[in-house]
Image (spheres, rainbow, N blue to C red):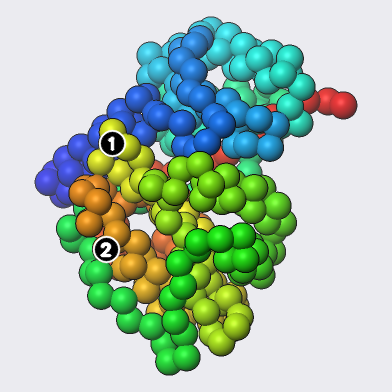
Amino acid sequence: MNDQTTAHREELLAVFDREMREQARPDGPGVRVERTDGVVRQVGGPHDWNAVIWSSPDLDAARADAAIAAQVTHWTELGYDEFEWKLYAHDRPADLGARLLAAGFVPEEPETLLVAPVADQPMTVRLPEGVRLRTVRDEADVDLMVRAHEQAFGKDGSRLRRQVLAQLREDPDHFFGVLAMAGDDPVSSARMELYPGTGFAGLWGGGTVEEWRGKGVYRALIAFRAGIAAERGYRYLQVDATEDSRPILQRLGFTVLGTTTPYVYRPAS
């Protein structure tokens, strides 16, 4: 990695940290962002995504342990089944992950954080024969999205269903859902969240059922969402990618900024 590439990556990471983490806004209806104890956290209802999304880069060992303890106390007192500390590889102190582990958090699979300028993305949608796109507009569409998600990822889509229905109902201007349909069957689904006050649009989902992978459906969904982001004046696309998606995104010009790992705390029952 040459000096120019390194500088570009560091600049993108600094903008992301500032706009999407330190200055975070609520990511949906019914949630709020709080700043306390050297962290920024999102707090909603028990079925929302509750998480620490930023921690101060000047946390030392003692302050980190105190911040961890304070967050455990906060969510335990709320009576929630779980909450997440969203740890990024560059967060400090360097052993923050080990400190979370020692406090009872359980790490899940890491994902790769990638960012790309919207203007650099291809926006022509090319779909394989027999596949069409359908935007998510109502409850029936949400059910199709959940069906595609569950088939693609093998995970329960109950939380996704609640989240998308709430966004369609209460914040439709900053949410876009799209389905790839083969006949009456959803073969892929994806979402985009626009974050007002930032330059970022977040790409989420993008799961394709196994028999339709490798045919360009995932790339088509990115191009479709990139076009919407460009129309709305957003500068960057951001993705937390699995290892299946990362190589495709890199070929499309996304820059790897690091990794992010969900550390999940579940109070003892």
Closer to us: 242 or 119 = 119
Residue on which disc 2 sits: 227
* Type of amino acid at the residue the image marks with label 1: Thr
Q: CA distance from mark 1 to mark 2?
A: 17 Å
Locate residue 197: give its quadrant.
top left
Helix, strand, or loop for circle 1?
loop
Q: Position of residue 12 (x, y in %)?
A: 24, 41
Which of the two labelled residues, at mark 1 and mark 2, occupies the earlier sequence position? 1
Q: Residue at x 56, y 77 (%)?
A: 187
Question: Which quarter shows the C terminus?
Answer: top right
The reply, left or right, for residue 179 in relation to residue 25 is right
* Type of amino acid at the residue the image marks with label 2: Gly
Locate residue 183: give its quadrant.
bottom right
Up the image or down, 45 lies above or below 253; here it is: above
**Mark 2 surroundings: few (<14), some (14-19) or many (≥20) residues within 10 A:** some
Q: Residue at x 34, y 67 (%)?
A: 224
Up the image or down, 145 lies above or below 41; here it is: below
**Mark 1 surroundings: few (<14), some (14-19) or many (≥20) residues within 10 A:** some
Res 153 label: none
Closer to us: 39 or 25 = 25
Q: Is residue 234 visible?
A: yes
Q: Is residue 98 visible?
A: no
Residue on which disc 1 sits: 198
Q: Position of residue 22 (x, y in %)?
A: 37, 24
Q: Residue at x 63, y 44 (%)?
A: 108
